[in-house]
Image (cartoon, rainbow, N blue to C red):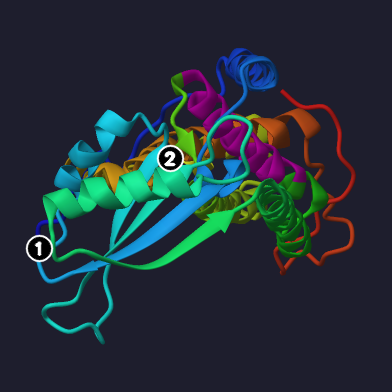
Amino acid sequence: MYRLKLVPQDTAIDFFRFWRYTFGASAVAMVLSLLIFAIVGLNFGIDFRGGTSIRTEAAQPVDVGAYRDALSPLALGDVAITEVFDPTFRDDQNVALVRIQAQEGEESVSPAVVAEIEAALQALDPSLRFTSVESVGPKVSGELIQSAIIAVALALAAVLFYVWIRFEWQFSVGAVAALVHDVVLTIGIFTILQIRFDLAIIAALLTIVGYSLNDTVVVFDRVRENLIKYKKRPLKEVLNISVNETLSRTVMTSVTTLLALIALFVLGGDVIRGFVFAMIWGVVVGTYSSVFVASAVLLWLGVTRDWSKTSDDKPGTQFTTAKKGG
């Protein structure tokens, strides 16, 4: 039976020939991302800046592009328009959510501006009704930022604990270093491109953490098996064997995921484009970091295989003190 393979089954690529340079480049990229973030800052969306959300209902189908065109002459700044789907809605119940960022020096959009928005939309569709108007103030936005930071930090802490229990502390440090690398570079690219950063991007960051961890654990599992199988080989050689053995699976997973994400990026519309871009970037840097950050940290820390506590007829599984390797 024919099986699709994007890379040969038996590869012998030396991934760690220049590992100090690739690891150093990743460290420099992280530092630059943090500096740009500190100087320029993220382009926060309504969720973090504060603003007003208006819920609309109409008999006609929602046309997000037409809504956006009707509001563009008002120069409202950051406007997010999404269609709301619910299986309980009637056929003639078409609901949309219009979110407008707070204007400079104000906590929310003023009633006069809300009236202008309603008039512009009703000129487009006279059947349009406004079922609710809600405002998000700076205090709530600050709480959302704090909650988002806590969510990402707790995810990284949980990963640290999980990998430490499953493997050894050197593996745990490598996995968390890779995840921090992915998150920091994602924040850096959003800062450079000034793409709107909202709660959807936080969801993307957490998804990236899960995706990258899955790829890293697959590599680390094979490393652990090969440390037992090749007891006398240097750690660098064992890591190269492990990465090459999992390369076909890694490339296949990444490519198929990217195909779906690119289709969503092109055809999904403006509403989810930021989220999908974050996912595409996360898949790329997550695949890179599994090898050139997580495994490089493991090579740097070193893993000494101590077989003195195991009998000759049983494979050892204990990795003890760390030493410099390379």
Q: Secondary structure at mark 1?
A: loop
In the foreground, 27 or 219: 27
Which segment is the magenta one?
173-192
In the foreground, 111 or 76: 111
Instruction: Left or right? Give the position of 221 relative to 31.
Output: left
Image: 87 above or below 323: below
Q: Quadrant of residue 233?
A: top right
For the N terminus, the quadrant is bottom left
**Rendered residue at 64%/53% (across/down):** 224
For the C terminus, the quadrant is top right
Badge number at residue 278? 2
Q: Residues within 10 Å of mark 1 (few under 14, many from 20)?
A: few
Q: Residues within 10 Å of mark 2 (few under 14, many from 20)?
A: many
Q: Position of residue 231 (x, y in %)?
A: 69, 47
Q: Which residue is mark 1?
A: 1
Residue type marked 1: Met
Q: Secondary structure at mark 2?
A: helix
Q: Position of residue 113 (x, y in %)?
A: 42, 43
Q: Tell me if residue 195 is in the magenta stretch.
A: no
Q: Main secondary structure of the magenta part?
A: helix
Image: 247 above or below 313: above
Instruction: Left or right? Give the position of 87 relative to 46.
Output: left
